[in-house]
Amino acid sequence: MAKKWLLIALKVAVSGGLIWFIMKDLDLQAAFLRLRQVDPIMLSLAMCALAVQACLGGLRWRAVAVAIKAPLKLLNALRLFYIGMFFNQALPGGTGGDAVRMYLGYRGGLSLRGAINSVMLERMVTVVALVLMVDVTQPFFTPTAGADKLELVRMTAVLITLVAVGGVAFIMILDRLPERMQKWKLVRGLGYLASDTRQVFLHLRHGLTVIFWGVLTHINLSLVVYLLASGLGLPVTLFDCLILVPPVALAATVPISIGGWGVREGAMVMAFGLIGVSAEGALVLSILVGLSGLAISLPGGLVWLLSRERDQGMGLDHMSEELSGSKS
């Protein structure tokens, strides 16, 4: 437990340190004035798009569950995903919502294997789709950022792709571990994950379906950023966002901060600076993206309070203990 809280404290320090480093040389008064003057119509449209984002997440999770033969109904997937979004914001660490989804999925009728692996693979699909988006859009960096940046962008995209493909391929062979190790429950669990990963990514129909929902999620996120940028009066086009938002989102997935805060701001300032957006404007845009995501996830707490699972009196500590005990 002490190690867990130490890790959380380190993530908080990273988030705070990165945000301080970005903000220390900026005109904060001008930045907050820009934030307060955001166009309410564009902000409302962005919030609607974020609501769609939550639905796309539920559809992506269900597509993964279908691929691994875990019977997850559509409405249940949407409801539990939204509850998970709330807990990702409410619990320290930024991934508590995933554990909640695993537990609620298990309590809702999924096998333990289906509950755990469907959430883990849904996360994996999100990252793979991001890498695919970066690969597809990076050739368009040349007219946007200038030819001098092309080689760096290309090398980074190749490196990220190799790491992603290598990581997924490694997971797919975890059931090939020596037979004497199969007596350990953890090793057997990794074997099930390997089998399910192959079912998701190597089965043509399932693979195309999950990647479709994953890519559509990131396209919608780019739309959200464009709407917010327009509301702030920043000189950004939707095409710019389709190119720049995926690498920013990919950077924010690195688990070194709380909910990507700090990392996202640094990546946003760097990426949007390539097209002439001021550091102040990019920072305000990133903060507004984070606050909007927080606001749209809060009603998930109400969904939780009104859900049948809440009526069964489940506490977060009990969730964590039962899930951990089931894994061992």
Image (cartoon, rainbow, N blue to C red):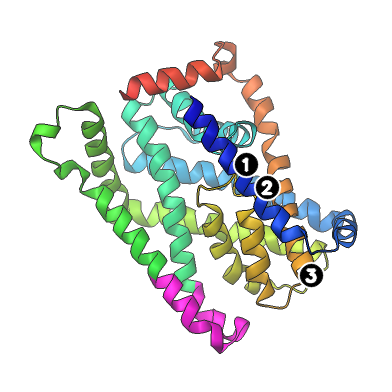
Mark number displayed over residue 296? none
Task: Name the residue at 65% across, 20% down.
Answer: 305
Q: Is residue 192 visible?
A: yes
**How far apart, in angstroms, are the residues tagged by discs 1 and 2?**
6 Å
Q: Is residue 81 visible?
A: no
In the image, taking residue 314 as reference, residue 303 lies left or right, namely: right
Crowding at mark 2 (Cα within 10 Å: few <14, some 14-19, many 20+): some
Read off the residue under disc 2.
Answer: 16
Q: Amino acid at mark 1?
A: Val
Task: Name the residue at 38% across, 32% down.
Answer: 116
Q: Which residues are magenta?
A: 137-158
Read off the residue under disc 1.
Answer: 12
**How far apart, in angstroms, are the residues tagged by discs 2 and 3?**
25 Å
Q: Amino acid at mark 2?
A: Gly
Instruction: Classify mark 1: helix, strand or loop.
Output: helix
Read off the residue under disc 3.
Answer: 234
